[in-house]
Image (cartoon, rainbow, N blue to C red):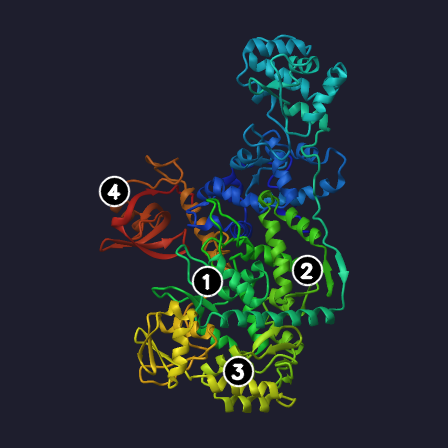
Amino acid sequence: MPEPSTAAAAPESGTGATSPRSLAEALRARDDAALSALLHSRPDLLNPVPGDVTQLATRAGTRASVVRALERLDRFTLQTAEALAVAPDPCPYPVLEGLLTGGEDERARAALPRALGTLRDQALVWGGEDRLRLVRTARELLAPSAQRPSPTGLGPTVAEATAGMSPTRVQEIVAAAGLPATHDPVSAVTALTSLFTDQERMSALLDEAPAEAHQVLGRLVWGPPYGEVTPNPAPPVRWLRDRGLLLPATARTVVLPREVALHLRGGLAHRDTAPVAPPVPAHREHRPQLVDANAAGQALAALATVEELVKSWEHTGPPVLRAGGLSVRDLKRAAAVLDTTEASAAFWIELAYAAGLLASDGEADERYAPTPAFDDWRELPPAERWSVLAAAWLPATRTAGLVGEQDAKGRTLSALGPELDRSAAPEVRRRVLELLADLPEGSSPDTEAVLARLAWERPVRTASDLRARLAGWALTEAEVLGVTGRGALSGPGRALLEHRDPAPLLAPLLPEPVDHVLLQADLTAVAPGPLRRPLGDTLAVLADVESKGGATVYRFTPGSVRRALDAGHAAADLHAFLKEHSRTPVPQPLAYLIDDVARRHGHLRVGAASSYVRCDDDAMLGEILADKRSAGLGLRRLAPTVLAARAEPTALLEGLRAMGYAPAAESGTGDVLVARADAHRTPARSAPVPVPDGPPVPDATLLGAAVRAIRAGDLAATAVRKDPGPAAGVPGELPRTSAAETLATVQAAALTGSAVWIGYVNADGAASQRVIAPVRVEGGFVTGYDHTADEVRTYALHRVTGVAELADDHL
């Protein structure tokens, strides 16, 4: 829990001190460090840099800025602001304390200075302890209304609820409540309010109420404070309405006044307060070595999954939808390739995209394909490859968990589509890992405890439950990626969170790549570990992956062998390759399979005329023509050894292979075409840039410059003028004088060595106020010491809007 701020520990004004009359005065009284802290926590106030403190205060009170500041408050600090919104304005500190503690909650009493200090630091509250003021915009946002109920469950005050009531009806209520009649509605409402806020008299009035009336009040006391009534209400409701304990809101609804509800609640603004953040204890304990080993296994599987996914799009990647993104059918295909669910496939696709390993190729027939960065990534050691993926995952705003859901217009969100960015995702992801890092090494928390903590830290956003969903996705993704192991943060994951390179920690945990496989008689090969790059690449072409895990099982099929022959490998090369890399003898069935496919491979030749088939065996061509399955290819005989086809070469190849033949593609010169694995790459593409959650947090240099600029503008804006002129007394207005008067005043100041106040518009059109001491006026320029900038500057006289002399004792 953060320490109480200095603003709370030492209020802006205590008893006997003069409270600032405005937020601008309160901000002006802050030192540079406090002003810098405000700008750091609310960076939207810096765009553009305010000209002075008055502009800063005005901007800090705008609706958009206040909403953003409220969204970043924890639950109890927000409850404190909500209590101030229903409290008298201004509100003494004891009154606020009573609204939050009821005089009994010691934890809330101890946490209140911290919460109030946060509100002061955020410029949402100003004034001394005797006159606490909530910024007007925040009060409007948090105060209860019929259209926007307050989280406090309170309704309007008596004065607000009776605003449209006839004076006669108000007097009837006053009389029924046992109060003397008054001469005007204002005093009548005041008397009624006084009754409802007097503990003894209010208790006596409620003692007279029927038992059923107490039940009615009990249903409304904690909110919502509105209830429906019939034109002829029951006697208990009529008794309450006649005495103003229920006031009409509309023709068919009544409302419980705020003062009555507070009396029934014992003065509490909330039924339950949350002064302390919910703990996130350790739910399970594991040995750190076991966590790291489990995470390393997940990391190795993640590398294999991403590589398999991207390589599967090398030849003919999925097309890009017209609206952008991947079709549902192509997502299903990717899930089938990876042997996983569609949700998991969407995550791996988005991760590869975030890491810059795949992108759209930008062609007329736009498709997704690997980028040149994929080839560079594959050459890295495994630990460094994982670091690339993890470093892309942590700050990514694209949210794979949304794939398959619908947007506000009812359109389905697709993988790689344009509507997946959620700016809150990186902050939630990092916060989840920070909560895991706070636990002892090897400890994993309960998911519900993590979600409860996040809901306390940012309660405003829990209404849409997006934050909770982002947290759930973050926990799942961290586990499958290897950032966590068995729910606990791993060593490499902790390094990633601390902005350190996780590769040195992960490398010793990963198994060394092996250079051999174990061939078996059932046409399979077992890889006892991750394979070295050349071996793995060749085996991936020669065989199909049958199962994954600690050991990968490959299966040899006629199609996989033909794929290797299409890639340019000869049968003798395949035999030599298997003999070199197998720790077991090459089984006879596998050798026969290679020889049999190689004997038939290339016997048929397909090329582009539209397309054609040629073969030295005219009998085989006759079989093809006689086969009914070839009807769709549009074949006809041109010569004894040549068939022409209407189908494209690629379709012709697929059709003949489906019929059980093993044709080979050939070039226009008759040479066999070799299909290379790296046939298609996109042009160089950069990884997608995360969408920021608002303005970036400024660095120390920008903050220092901004504070100096604000102080400089404030000095000029508050300078005391000797001859005020028409613009004096209007904050932010530039002085206006004629060109002749401006020149004369500046020249006189240069002769006497006095300072003047000028308005200046620079070449970009930005207006500012300056306090300068002219030393030279010539050539249409004035040079002097600028008190607001604390340096010597030169200004063009034609850009000076006006000038005024300062009071003798101002500087």
Q: Amino acid at mark 4?
A: Glu
> Viewer-nearest of labels 1 and 4?
1
User: Dot 1 corresponds to which residue?
Assistant: 688
Does dot 1 land on a helix, a strand or a loop?
Answer: loop
The 10 Å Cα crowd at callout 2, few under 14, some 14 to 19, many 20 or more, is many
> Viewer-nearest of labels 4 and 2?
2
Label whose residue precedes the other's in the sequence (4 or 3): 3
| Contact (Cβ within 8 Å) of mark 2 with mark 1 | no
Residue beneath the point at 72% across and 57% down: 445
> Viewer-nearest of labels 3 and 1?
3
Residue 10: image location, x then y, percent: 64, 44
Residue 82: image location, x then y, percent: 61, 36
**What is the CA distance from the residue labelled 4 to the residue labelled 2?**
69 Å
> Viewer-nearest of labels 2 and 1?
1
**Label ID, residue 21:** none
| Contact (Cβ within 8 Å) of mark 4 with mark 2 | no
**What is the CA distance from the residue labelled 1 to the residue labelled 4?**
57 Å
Label whose residue precedes the other's in the sequence (4 or 2): 2
**Label ID, residue 538:** 3
Does dot 4 land on a helix, a strand or a loop?
Answer: helix
Residue beneath the point at 59% across and 78% down: 555
| Contact (Cβ within 8 Å) of mark 1 with mark 4 | no
**Label ID, residue 741:** 4
Q: Amino acid at mark 1?
A: Pro
> Viewer-nearest of labels 4 and 3?
3
User: Dot 2 corresponds to which residue?
Assistant: 436
Label whose residue precedes the other's in the sequence (2 or 1): 2
Name the quadrant containing residue 533.
bottom right
- Residue 5 visible at all: no
Name the quadrant containing residue 324.
bottom left
Residue 403: image location, x then y, percent: 53, 55
Label whose residue precedes the other's in the sequence (3 or 1): 3
